[in-house]
Amino acid sequence: MLRVLRWAMGVLILFLNWVFTPRGIKRETEIQEQVDAQTKNLTLYQYKACPFCVKVRRSMKRNTLNIETRDAKRSDNAREELVEGAGKLKVPCLRIEEEGKVSWMYESSDIINYLEDRFAVKAT
């Protein structure tokens, strides 16, 4: 019974996310290319129907961030990378590689704040 309820909630979450998908911001081509180059060093480990993961992916969409996602539920490799690198199987988790150093960030609100502080379009 619980498994069916979880499945139904997951389907509902994905459906609502699809219906209410946010629009991405538009940047000048050169600026978007710079952002894309910076996001190549970021990877989001997530579960497709996890509400907190959906929240992070929606923020990525709003900010037009092309960050690779890896499904730690369906991919054994992604799950192993997450556990070995970050130390535990918990999603969402953002892998950040800067200047040859790798750090891992949990908690959807922390991840969103990090992404918005780093990549949000500033008003001029």
Image (cartoon, grey):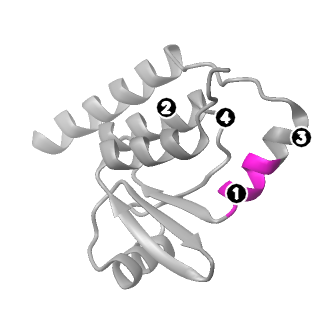
Image location (x, y in percent) of residue 104? 40, 69
Residue at image x 62%, y 51%?
Answer: 67
Mark nearer the viewer, 2 or 1: 1
Image location (x, y in percent) of residue 8? 27, 30
Nearer-the-camera pick, 3 or 28:
28
Q: What residue type is labelled 4?
A: Thr
Residue at image x 26%, y 30%?
Answer: 9
Mark nearer the viewer, 4 or 1: 1
Q: Which residue lies furthest to the top in this view?
A: 19
Label 4 – label 3 distance at C-alpha: 14 Å
The label shown at residue 64 is 4
Q: Name the residue under label 1.
A: 38
Q: Mark 3 points at which residue?
A: 30
Describe the element under mark 4 as helix, strand or loop.
Answer: loop
Q: Which amino acid does label 1 sit on?
A: Gln
Q: Tell me which segment is drawn in magenta.
A: 34-40
